[in-house]
Image: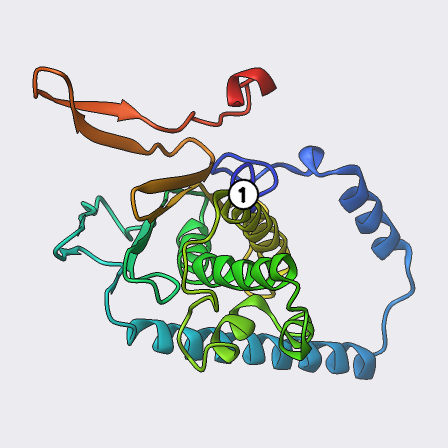
Amino acid sequence: MGSCLSGEGGGSHGGTASALPYALAAAAVAAAAAPPESDAGANKRRKSAVKKMKRNCSFDAKMELWLHRIPKRLFVNGSSEVASLFSKQGKGINQDAMIVWENFGSKEDTILCGVFDVHGPFGHMVAKKVRDSLPLKLCAQLQLNSFHKDGHVDIISCGLGSLTSEESALTSTGGEAGIHNQNHTDITTMRESFLKAFKVMDKELKLHPSIDCYCSGTTAVTLVKQGRDLVIRNVGDSRAVLGTRDEDDFLIAVQLTVDLKPNLSNQEKK
């Protein structure tokens, strides 16, 4: 997500040295002027970085394996009784990602959908990470918001704060991504949870040790269908379109989101 989810510059091409932010340029000058680090210190830092990267990769691999086992969670070409997914691959790797998650939040009448259109050389890694992590972050935020609104700020909700949103979504539900209140989540809570989940996702991508998001990112058009209600949140210029019928029973397309491009005014975004 960057100009969309991460990728703080936008565009799919790497910037030149002159385009570097002032802070990075200053850091580069400071690093050049600093005395050389000892071999022992450099090796220690390198080993620490490798160990941290392995730990993060291990958690990502375990989470991905768990997600693949969830029934009614579609993320490749295919269909179910209520949804169909198809993406045509062009030359090279298919960078884009998509998801339909039925019974989202352990609710039979709730479905989450998402499409992630990437840019940049590492866009496919960003899109995959967002596809897998954003729904869990949304679950975690829904849990926390439900606790606070209901006045149930107990040891569970306090403990959630010390975990990543993926871990909290798994831990609090015993391995099943869900929210505690089985009734419909009110629209305001859903909107607030979406906004917080997007912010947390973007921050996590920028700090990820093995995904370079400086010139790579993804759009994210996501929606939750809850009964007959639709809650939609989008970043970037991917588009949600509703297929419906007019008064003459002809099938028509209704655009539900605004393409969020850099040259769009704040008034046009609303």
Is residue 244 in sight in this rendering?
yes
Q: Going 17% across and 55% down the picture, which residue do you hit?
A: 77
Q: Going 31% across and 51% down the picture, which residue do you hit?
A: 98
Q: Going 18% across and 45% down the picture, which residue do you hit?
A: 88
Q: Which residue is mark 1?
A: 188
Choose between 201 and 126: the one closer to the eye.
Answer: 201
Dividing the picture into quadrants, the one containing residue 16 is top right
Q: Amino acid at mark 1?
A: Thr
Is residue 114 in sight in this rendering?
no
Q: Going 75% across and 77% down the picture, which residue do you hit?
A: 45
Choose between 261 and 211: the one closer to the eye.
Answer: 261
- Judge left or right: residue 144 versus residue 12: right
Choose between 266 and 32: the one closer to the eye.
Answer: 266
- Judge left or right: residue 110 versus residue 156: left
- Most extreme residue toward the left, as rendered? 249
Q: Is residue 137 above or below residue 188?
A: below
Task: Check disc 1 and report its element: helix, strand or loop.
Answer: helix
